[in-house]
Amino acid sequence: MADHQSSLREPLVSAPRTLGQITDDVMRPMHARPTWKWWAAFAVAVSLLTLGVSTVAYQILTGIGTWGLNRTVGWAFDITNFVFWVGIGHAGTLISAILFLFRQKWRTSINRSAEAMTLFAVMCAGVFPIIHMGRPWVGFWAIPYPNDRGPLWVNFRSPLLWDVFAISTYFTVSAVFWYVGLVPDLATVRDRLKSGLKKALFSVLSLGWNGSSRTWARYEVLYLLLAGLATPLVLSVHTIVSMDFATSVIPGWHTTIFPPYFVAGAVFSGFAMVLTLLIIARVVMGFEHLITIRHLENMAKVIIVTGSLVGLAYGTEFFVAWYSGSAFERFAFINRAFGPFAWSYWIMVSCNVISPQLLWFKRLRTSPLALFALSLVVNVGMWFERFVIIVTSLHRDFLPSSWAMYAPTKIEVFTMLGSFGLFFTLFLLFVRVLPVISIGEVKAVLSFGRKGHKPTHEPLTAPAPVPADRPDVVPAPIPLSGATTP
Amino acid sequence: MTFAIGYFDDEAQVLTATRKARESGFSVSDVFSPYAIHGIEDAMGLRPSRLPWVCFAAGMTGATLAMGFQLWTSVSSWALNVGGKPFASVPAFIPVTFELTVLSAALTSAFALFARAKLFPGKKVKVLPRVTDDRFALVLEERDGAAASFLQSAGALEVAAETPQGDAP
């Protein structure tokens, strides 16, 4: 592009756009009729969700025995899925909070959908421990409240209780962060709509935002504070999840490396999921100029780093198992790599350690198709990582008399599919009803890397073009004499 | 009181105009923009937000309550021997304390912003045309037409005189 200031600062929005056009671009999918591709994806997602809901209803009515868990492998598919989904959520907070603190402006086009992904993934994760309780209707027992069973309180020394606090806090703070980020954009949408239910809804949700700089100044402070709070929070959540394992005495679980290893793995799998979703979304919604190859490439670089960290953790685990001199520990790891579940171990290694190294090649890193394929591979690999940790450690523990093989039942598989259905249903609805890209933040970086950028002057009195597919949008100029009252 | 509203289509222009307006002795009522203009708080002469203090106080309160509650339940109200661990096992209480610190700090700060900026669901508000889309508006207190002519000279695309609602004082 000819209008670069410097080759070090490539524009973040690759096509020349004015402020108003950014609003148009982002709002277009909210008004256009859904395409058949969206309907097809939605049909698949809702079918999976229905399958999942009916499966969960069946297992709750019948009992947890429908899982067919072996006595030694009491934590299998469900906790695998729990850890998997919590991990997926982490990239959202990482993109929105940590990259914000590091002043990484390239996050602006992707943070909104990444945060939405976080919320939906945490919802999916939350389902599993609740089902795993066996009696979900007494799930509230995990919350400390004055009860009539004597002054009986929850056990605050249990990592499972820490999970309750960690996951619910994470969900709440992520939701607040997401919503606070949405408010100015909701106002933008509100002011573009003419009338009707949609406008009323956006008026309520946008809380009366009017773009005042007094509010903006405070808003920026709040956003910074929330980012600062969410950053340690995201690290704490997966650390606490890892402590579910690390504070036990099972060989293969009882390791001090777990907290950082789990956090790295979470970021790794989360970025892979963000890539999977955004590569589809940018093509389907025509956001190639907003979610550029550069965004994809930067995420690919994060995947290389975290994939290598995960690989390092696998190696360290093995080394420590040998170096500890503990026969049980050593056995657990040799059994992992060469025992009856060796296939899952090697799927994990090839997907998580070997495949991301391909991203060192710039050609692969900048090819959406290759990235999409690799992101799926990483998702599979990270799911298997949790499976390996849980199943291979449990199926052969201290006593050979309690050894058992484990295979998932239909119920477990359907529940897992149902969680994917829930995730994709929510995501597909999200892209239809809310601005998928942070309009305000993208506008702020529009001139980034451009010399003398200035939006073309449209006089206030001349109507801005209204796309034919958006009859409900008010033609832009509003008479100056009367401000609009939503 | 009447106000002069100057509409701009460029961030840099409105920033310069705001700075000049204050230097020329005009009273800047507010600046409306579709995104946060960095440096506008200096140009407008806004005092730094006190939200960080709210956040800090809420975090400390959350931490104290969480740790206090855990110690009270585990040591005093119903001391339960779990695996021979001490009753006042402070390190084991850190995760929950941390989570509640973050939770109360985040929620309180967010609600503090909403309260301070008077943002609430269903608020009736007058929005200047296109300021949430692609226009920047500098609102000055009018002094016998001086503000309007200042805005003209500062490069405003259009100048209007009226009494804006919303956050304007």
Image: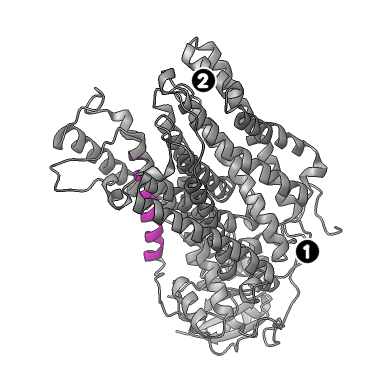
Tell me if label 2 and label 1 are in contact, CB under 8 Å: no
Residue A318 within the magenta-colored segment of the rendering: no
* The N terminus of chain A sits in image quarter: bottom right
In the rendered image of this protein, does residue B11 appear above or below residue B142?
above
The answer to which of B146 and B129 lies nearer the viewer is: B129
Residue B25 visible, this angle: no
Residue B111 within the magenta-colored segment of the rendering: yes
- Quadrant housing residue A314: top right
Give me the residue at 45% from left, 46% from top: A229
The number of callouts visible is: 2
Q: Residue furthest top?
A: A325
Q: Residues within 10 Å of mark 2 (few under 14, many from 20)?
A: many
The alpha-carbon separation of the residues under discs 2 and 1 comes to 54 Å
Q: Residue A230 placed where, x, y %? A: 47, 47
Q: Residue A307 placed where, x, y %? A: 65, 34
Q: Amino acid at mark 2?
A: Ala
Magenta-tinted stretch:
B96-115
Residue B27: give its label.
none
Badge 1 is on which residue? A15
Give me the residue at 74% from left, 61% from top: A288
* Host chain of mark 2: A
Residue A159 visible, this angle: yes
Give me the residue at 38% from left, 41% from top: A163
Q: Residue A164 placed where, x, y %? A: 36, 44
